Amino acid sequence: MVESEPKLLNSITFLESGFCVHPGFVALRGGGLATRKFPAMVAVLEHPRHGIILFDTGYSEKFISETESFPYRLYRWITPVTIDPATTARHKLTQLGISPADVRTIIISHFHGDHIGGLWDFPQAQFVYVPHAFEDVRHRKGFSALLAGYLPGLLPTDFLSRSRVLEPASKRPLPPEFSPFQVGYDVFGDETLWAVELPGHAVGQIGLFARDSSGKAVFLVADACWASEAFLELRLPHPVTKILFADSATYRNTVRQIREFHELHPETAIIPCHCMKAVEAFRQVGTSLSQKNYSYNEPQ
Ligand SMILES: [Zn+2]
């Protein structure tokens, strides 16, 4: 049997859209009391036909306005956030020559505020996610929303009409290069982007597999772990974080699966959303978007 060539993106770029701080031990057992910075990374995926795709959006000014009053103010107290207009994904994309309207797709890993914080900034984007991730939060308000890390006002008013959900029935068997993950969503039906479910941290959280133009593979794992050490050394977050997790036992299982994936496919860059170390390692070897090579053509 002849294996088909992996389908490639033009480029994969990471932008930091704000950050929050926590003592190190919160994210990793034995991480110490010293404050550690957790950047909210946005992956910018340049697809040959579908143009600019974002995987999550980080924070934005909207996150600040939505957390001005109680009870949502508590969100900012628990996770002190630094964001200003010059540090948003929207602003940084503009500096790369990409206007907000050029972003046609935003894939949402899960509905925590630091992942959907910038949805309002991209008025032409279609939102892609699994339906159970949204169902878990859509009717939550006040403290119930807060406990799910969700801020209802971060969803644009036309969120539903701009949504394209990944129906569980559309899951397909994955090629062996993704083992131990068995099934996933072929996001555009062209095998360039494969989403897999990484539950536990949040209901219906998804991760994403992609390759850049050089063939370098990435596995974006969102918040399935907060730092690479979590899967490399099987160091889990402090028990205090359990209150924010959908299901701790499932979370541990997901981290073990990522660890197994790493052992089987050490050449793939596994990138947690908040891990600067993983992003910097990828920047040394990956193909990043530059103003020179960006071009968008309406898909036929
Ligand atoms: Zn999260």
Image (cartoon, helix red, strand yellow):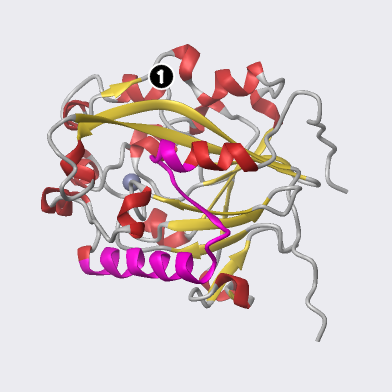
Q: Position of residue 270 (x, y in %)?
A: 49, 53
User: Which residue occupies the foreground of this view, 294 or 160?
Assistant: 294
Q: Position of residue 101 (x, y in %)?
A: 68, 27
| Residue 118 located left or right of residue 114 | right
Which residue is at a point 80% across and 47% down the rendered structure image? 49
Residue 271 included in the magenta stretch of the image: yes
Is the residue 218 above or below the residue 281 in the image? below
Q: Secondary structure at mark 1?
A: helix
The residue where tag 1 is placed is: 61
User: Which residue occupies the foreground of this view, 55 or 104?
Assistant: 55
Question: Range of the magenta residues?
Answer: 249-278
> Can you name the residue that lies furthest to the bottom here?
1
Q: Is residue 26 visible?
A: yes
| Residue 54 located left or right of residue 181 | right
Kind of residue at disc 1: Glu
Q: Is residue 202 visible?
A: no
Q: Position of residue 191 (x, y in %)?
A: 71, 63
Ligand 1 within 8 Å, label 1 CB: no
Which residue is at a point 46% across and 27% down the rendered structure image? 17
Mark 1 is surrounded, within 10 Å at the Cα level, by few (under 14), some (14 to 19) or many (20 or more) other residues, namely some
Which residue is at a point 21% across and 40% down the rendered structure image? 146
